[in-house]
Amino acid sequence: MKKLILASALLTASMVSAQQVSNITGSGASFPFPLYTEMFNAYKTQAGVSVNYASKGSGGGKRDIINRAVDFAGSDAPFSAAEAKDAPAEVSFVPMALGAVVPTYNIPGLTTKLKFTGALLADIYLGKVKKWNDAPIAALNKNVKLPDLNITPVYRSDGSGTTSIFVDYLAKVSTDWAATVSKGPQSSVKFPVGVGGPQNAGVAGLVRQTPGGIGYVEVTYAKANKLEYGLVRNKTGKFVDGGDLKEVAAASDAEILPANGIDSITNSSIGYPISGYTWILLYKDQKYGNRTKAQAQALVDLVQWMLSSKGQEFHDKLDYGRIDGQAAKVANRILAGVNYGGEAIK
């Protein structure tokens, strides 16, 4: 009887301790920021826990989680070899949403959705295609009156998961890009031409302010800024709209997500070709520094809710793809492995 009373008291103390955790901190990717803003506002209402998320780019988020400056990070890019080495312990990547990176542009008076190929986008960002009425653009858009207007490529000036997705795609479709700029996913690259802006919002803002500008942003930012964005040809030859969630989901479904939850789905066999995952990053073993089990439990509770049907319901209206099917099983298995000093967190 004494043992039962003691166990009950310990359980009650644990619940009270968990309830006292009222604030969770995160930082990182701007790619999912509109989604996370809605989700975290809803979570505060439902669970009474405030989630303070600083949208500073995937590079900043990865640095913060490596330095253990936040409870979790958001990233649309995996760790580089150097980042993985710098992390003091194993970091789990939990897939949280799918998104589309779209080529958005500002051509005064033009409201047509232009068509692009990956090779054309690479040549624009390599500085080979310089005007909007140049032959490679005109050939794809035969019924569109294109202006004799200089193209100003806009890119991310900060470490960016959106950049990682975009340049990963360009490396797969352009041998010139792979040979001269980047061979695969990188959060920061040296663009040969153009101007830089911070975060998705900064790129969208620069494109909006620059006649002739072209940029790459998560589709939600193009829509929020009322910017035109183009269709991109996939492997089947179809010109696909990145705002079509079925096409983004198709790109994901074409790949089997590995057990670690990390995969590139750019240039997949079907669907929208510049699609990608965004992840929540947290330490697999939550027992570090002065961190309490209550803090670990509160974080796991948050991520579990984000993966649940209540959390995922925000995705559709904000143009993000849900994590479901096989990807959801992988995500939940990864989260189930998060522990506190080897002790399971339920």
Image (cartoon, helix red, strand yellow):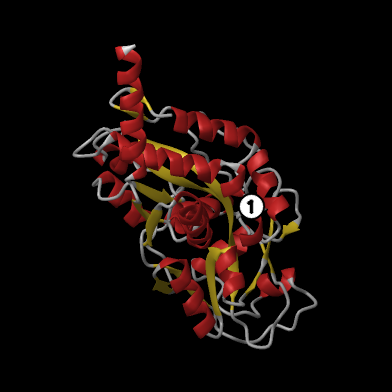
Secondary structure found at label 1: loop
Question: Closer to the camera, 333 or 205?
Answer: 333
20 displayed left or right of 176: left
Name the residue tied to disc 1.
273
Question: Which quadrant of the rendered structure holds the N terminus?
Answer: top left
Residue drawn at x 61%, y 64% as measured from the top left? 120
Asked whether residue 313 is in view, the answer is yes
Is 240 placed above or below 228 here?
above
Picture layout, residue 57 above or below residue 145? above
Residue 205's x, y, as percent?
Answer: 48, 78
Residue beneath the point at 24% across and 39% down? 291
- Amino acid type, residue under disc 1 in the picture: Pro
Quarter location, residue 250:
top right
Q: Residue at x 31, y 13 (%)?
A: 3
Residue 244 image point, x, y percent: 71, 58
Which residue reaches farthest front?
1
Crowd class of label 1 (few under 14; some 14 to 19; many from 20; radius 10 Å): many
User: How many tags in the picture?
Assistant: 1
Q: Is residue 26 above or below residue 147?
A: above
- Residue 187 seen from this side: no
Q: Nearer the viewer, residue 8 or 176?
A: 8
Q: Position of residue 283 (x, y in %)?
A: 33, 37
Front in this rendered view, residue 100 or 23 = 23
135 displayed left or right of 31: right
